[in-house]
Every structure is written in C-alpha cells, then in structure tokens.
Amino acid sequence: MSPDHPVDEAMTARAVIDADGLLVEWNAGAERLLGHSAAEVLGRPAANLLADAGADGTAVPDRDRWDGVVTLRRRDGGTLPVWVLAHRLRCPQEGPDRWLVVTPLDPDGTRAHDDPLDDVSLLDSPCAMVIYDERLRVHSVNSVMAEVLDLPAENVRGLRTHEMTGMALGNDLEGRLHHVLTTGRGTAVRTYVPVGGDRTLSWLARIAPIRDTLGRVRGVSVAAHDFTEQHQAQKRLQLVNEASVRIGTTLDVTTTAQELADICVPALADFVSVDLLDPAEHGELPEGRPVAPIGLRRTAHKIIDSDGGGVGVVKPGQLDHYPATSPQADALLAGHTIVASDTTGDLDQWLSWDPQRADRIKEYGIHTSMSVPIQARGTTLGVAVLSRFANRQAFSPDDVLLAEEVTARAAVCIDNARRYSRERETALALQRSLLPRSLPSTAALEAASRYLPAARSGVGGDWFDVIPLSGMRVAMVVGDVVGHGIQASATMGRLRTAVRTLADIDLAPDELLTHLDDLVVRLSEEAGTDGVSGEVGATCLYAVYDPVSRRCTLARAGHPSPVMVPPGAGPVEIDLPAGPPLGLGGLPFESAEVELREGTVLALYTDGLIETRERDIDASHALLCQALAASSNSLDETCDRVLHTLLPPGGVADDVALLVARTQGLPASRVATWDIPSDPALVAPIRKQVVEQIERWNLTEATFTAELVVSELVTNAIRYGTHPIRLRLIHDATTLICEVSDTSHTAPHLRRAKTYDEGGRGLLLVAQLTQRWGSRHTADGKTIWAEIGLLGET
C-alpha cells in the first residue's frame, strides 16, 4: 500500500498465534483493547489471556475459520467479553500453520452524524453487498453478504478485507478499493477464492465510489455476484477440452497413462495413480469383469508439486495384486466409479487391507478418494484412483462426472495405444521371422547387418539378404516395401522369397528385377480385388559378386545406390542407373558392373537411413561416408557407428535396413581352367589333368567323385552342347566346384532312365554324388555346375 493509504491499523485488535499456541504478533489495536504491550505478551502462551474457566489453550478448531465470543483478561486485572474471528494461516513452505485472530474496535465511535454511508440502502439488494468507509474498513454488509461470509453482520463492522476473509486476496482487493476511493472511478473484479471454511466461491464484483451531497468520495461499495456454478462448469469444460488435446499424443500406453495422471493433477486431484491390467499371453485382455484378487501394473502416477514420487507405495512398472476391499478392485468389480472419504468411514475400510498404504495416507492427510474404472469398447483396461489432501473439499457429483469423462477419453487413447502396440509387436515378430536370423558364411565376402523398426509409424517392409550362388558367387539384396504394419511385412516376406527363388535360377540382376516388378504388379492387382487400395510398391537393390573375377554386377529399382570403400581410399557412391520403383510395370532395368578389389567395403541401405527432417539427403550422405571412412576391422562396429552417426537417439521415423559387406578374392591358385576339344576321345587326357590338379591341391579324398563328375559333365557338353566348351575347377576350404560351360542355351534336365536305356544316368549320378548341382545361363550360353563337399583343407 502507498504511504497515504487511509487505513488505521489501530482500529482492529489483531494477533497471530503459532502452532505451539504462542503469540508471535501483537498490534497496537490489541494493546489498546487489553492494555498488554507487545513486549509483555510476545512469545508467551495465548491461553494466558483467556479468562474462561478451564481454558487451557489446547483446543484447536478443526476448520480453517472460527468465530465466537471469548472472555479475555485485561492488563488491569479485569475481564472483557469480545467477539473474535480466527483464520488458519497455512504456511506449507515456511513451517506449521498459524492462526490470525482479529476483532474490530468500536467501529461506531468515530462515525459522523452526517455520514453518507448511512443513507445507502442494502437490505433490498439481491446481491451480496458490503460498504467500506474512508478507512477501507467494513461499514456495513447486507444479509446476503453476511450469509455468504457465514458471519454476523454486526460483528464484521470495522474489519479490513483480509481480516474478514483471512486470505492474501484481501490485500489485492484492498488495493482496488483504495484505487476507487482515490480516483472516484469504479471497476469490476473477478475473484475465485475459498470463502467461509472449506467452500469455494467465485465472485464477479463491481466496485463503485459512494459520494456525499458535495460530490466527495466518502466510501466504496462492493456488489458481488456468485457465479461459482458457471465458473466451475467453465473449468470442467476447459479440462475436458484440454484432455482431448493433451491425452493421446503418442501411441505408447505408458505415456498415455501418464498424460491422464498429469492432466488430473492439480485440476481434479492432488494424487492420481493409473493401474492397468496385464494382457494375456497373446496380448488380449481377459473378457468380462476381472475376478479378485486382481493383478494390476502401476503404469503412471502423479502427485501435486512433484515429479511423480511421494504418495505411491507401488513404483511405476511394478505388478501388485489387490483384494476385493481395495479401492482399485472395488471399482473394477462393481464396474462403476466409487468414492470414499474419511467422514463416511469408507476410506478406513478401503485401507484396512494394507497397513503400509494406510500409514502413507495418514501421513499425507488424504481425506477422500475416487476410483474410476478405465473402460473402452466394452473392455476393462484398468483403474484410475484420484485422491485429495491439499484440496480440503470432498469430491462432488460434478467432480465424479468430470473424472469419468476425462478417464473415458483417456481409455480410448490407451486402448488405441494397446492395440497399436499389439499389432506392432505382431508385425515386428513377423518381420523378424521373415528376415535372416544370421548371414551365411561365404568365401566371397563377410557381412554384418542391422534392422531398426520405425519408432512411431510401426514396423515396415524393409529387408536385406545374402544369398550364396553357384561358382562361389554371392548375391546381396536390400529392399523396401511402401507402407507399414503387418501388410507391409507380409508383402516383404513374399518379395524376399521371390528374390531367393529367382536368385536360385541365376538370373542377371536386371532380369531378376524385371520378374520382381511383374510380381509386385500382380500383388497390386490382388490387393485391389479385396476392396482396399491396390497400391503396392517397393524399391530394391540387387548385386552379385564373383570372388574369382572380383567383379560385381548391380541393378536397382528406385533404390539408393550403395557406397563402396576401396582399401586405402575414401568412400564413393557407385554410379548406377536409377531404375523405376517396382510395381510400375513395363519399364526396363539396367545393370552395371564394377571391379572390387579384395577388402572393399560395400554399404547397402534403405532410405530410412538417410532421409530425415533434420537435414537434407546430401548432408546425410556425407555423414554416411564419414562413418564408413573410419577404419575398423569389425563390420559390426561399422554398422553401429553408421547408425549412431545418422540416426537420432529417440528412434527413427522410418524403418532402417543396413547391410555392410567386405569382399574377399579367391587366389588364382585355387582356380584351374581347361578348354575342351570337340573330340570325345580327348576327354581322357583332360580327366587325367583334373586328377593331377586335385592331387596338387591335396584333395585326394575327392579324386574319385571329381573324376566321375568331370567325365559326365564334359561328355554331355561335347555330345549336346556347342563349342567352345570350357571346364573350370574352383575350391575353397570346404567345397570343390566343377563347372562346364558351352555356348548352347539349352539347359539339361534330370530324368530317370528306364531299365534298358543306354544313357540318361549321367546327371542322376552327378546329383547323387554331389552336394548340389545346377545350371545357369550366361551371356554366351550356359554353365553346368556341381559342388563336391570336402572334409577339410589339408
């Protein structure tokens, strides 16, 4: 207040009593009333001033306000009956509560006979009205205001606003009164304050000056309209609207449950716990109402003015079982909201099953609790328990309706998150079952891989594979099906199977993508017949590496080009024809061939690795090259470094598949080649040279089989093939490969010869004696190959 404030502090006797009953404040008005100076009473028991027989000062009102007549001792030994008004002053941060005790001093003794305030009629006004004099003390209140204050009208005369209400709000209102008193201009005030014990009233007050016949401002009138119901309805509507915005921002069950707890504190409760039923083995919740004892997992909780610690005995993530008498189980078994409070005794009955919880409830002073079942789409998901201790009001029927409305909105979001999580887990399990559990060990290369599902949009259709081919060659493939969820994963599985099937017949990369494109077109047509969108699309990169020639043939269908890191050089993107995405149909694909030195690192990946909102593709590509450039003997470390460099810590927006391979070359000493003459009589010398080569390799255990296989394959090539004919032997630690190539495109067929047939048994013998055999088309003709297993290199 300004120095020229008209308030006379001596017009009210005021004292403050601490929690121990000692006087800690004593103003001049109190000294004027009883004659005791501040030095004589401060620090001493307030009960010493009571003249009532048997008064010991130990009785503390159980409400926040008390008024009545007490008999006090004067300093001169006399006694004085006085009406006093006492307010509890809550000091949550400074220490225990204190009490403010006030009484007005002779408010009528200084009134002028021509006081214009006496001419103001208050009795007929339907509004709650109070008139303040020039000293900003209560001159009079009408019956409506006295009823609102729950105080006798004649006893509040002479009090200041904060002395009458016991709240800090009185200082703000007194400042407004002073402004009207000094300026003569009225104003309107909205106040939302507790008045009269534990009740909360919302007022819309208009403050106006009172003038005498000469136009001078002699006082101030306040007319207050109670719009508590309208204000509470507005607050409830605002909370419901806020709940629709703040709850369900993610498809995560725990986050959604925490959002429910956060929005209810402190608007509706001081402590909220959210406990959810655990799903069964296949992610389904039990049908119907649960049976006690009920197992619930603490998913979220929130306490006022805290980060979530405090009241809760159960920690987030902990599973606990609740008997039928507990608040959680009681509401779930009943199927509707149940409210309990200490005034009705239900709360004690609720807490009798758990002494630890009962002690915690008493420690915090929780006086009322409400259990609301969380139900959505006919399924019970869990229960939310709302409790109050800082808010002294019990839950009203409107509070129950509001809690049920907010919980119902949250229940739908929790159910959506639960269904999404279940579908995501199913799709992820399907995805993992369709992806290779481990990469095959081959002589052509060593490889490592990583797959990361999208954090928010769900599992997608990214895949990778390493496929051993004939002649020590190996195929590498990375693909990406458009979309997310189970449908995308299933489509991915079909495409991966198709790629493996097409790879087994040794199609060139561009031909393989052409066949794969036809398959995607058919899948789109099939999807369109089911009444859903027929849009099925994918991208793919297919590469075949030959460790003998050290050359790699690649083709892509709308997929990012791979990055290679030659030994001793920096990373570089392989320049490939782009190729259209799979599913457009009828467009050609082109392949390219590059020579890869032994030890070259190849990185094949899907677009989720480099496409992000935080940076453009060029920047991501530069980071990828930087991560690949760091030398590392471990491909797993390389994969981890790439992901750590490019991906955000909170999860990726799209699926990511990464395949990193290091090429290995087969030494020339492990390969032998012969040009076969067209004369069958010259097969024997070739067979002899083969035996000698096998002996030089110390593979004598394979001599008989290899001699027989070479004889059959070379004889068939001379008899049915077209020259030139070439024989090649390749071996590594575990396999000896025999290849016979000619320029005929006619592939051989295995058949079972009849009893008296003179031929037709050669390929049958080859199939019986070797691990596997087959043929592949080449640019010049075909190659027939057979693999002979070795016991080990000697």
Image (cartoon, grey):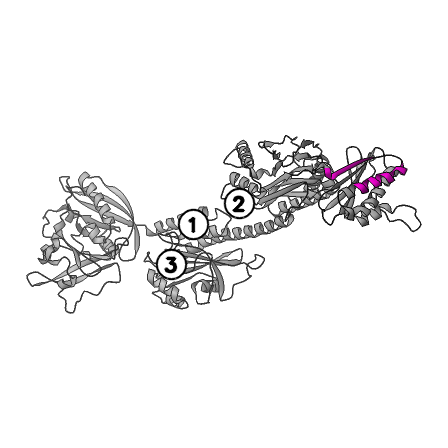
The one of 407 and 49 positioned closer to us in this rendering: 49
Which SS type dominates the magenta stretch? Answer: helix
User: Residue shown at 40%/56% (left/top)?
Assistant: 272
Q: Which residue is mark 1?
A: 240
449, above or below 15, in the image? above
Q: Which residue is mark 3?
A: 311
Q: Earlier in the sequence, mark 2 or mark 1?
A: 1
User: Residue shown at 16%/61% (left/top)?
Assistant: 46
Q: Which residue is mark 2?
A: 456
Task: Give me the C-alpha separation between circle 2 and circle 1.
Answer: 26 Å
* Residue, far left: 76
Left or right: 129 in relation to 511:
left
Q: What's under tag 2, amino acid-wise?
A: Arg
Spot occupied by residue 267 in the image (x, y as percentages of width and height): 37, 52
Query: Residue 740 lies in what quarter of the image?
Result: top right
Tell which tag, 2 or 1, sits nearer the viewer.
Answer: 2
Q: Earlier in the sequence, mark 3 or mark 1?
A: 1
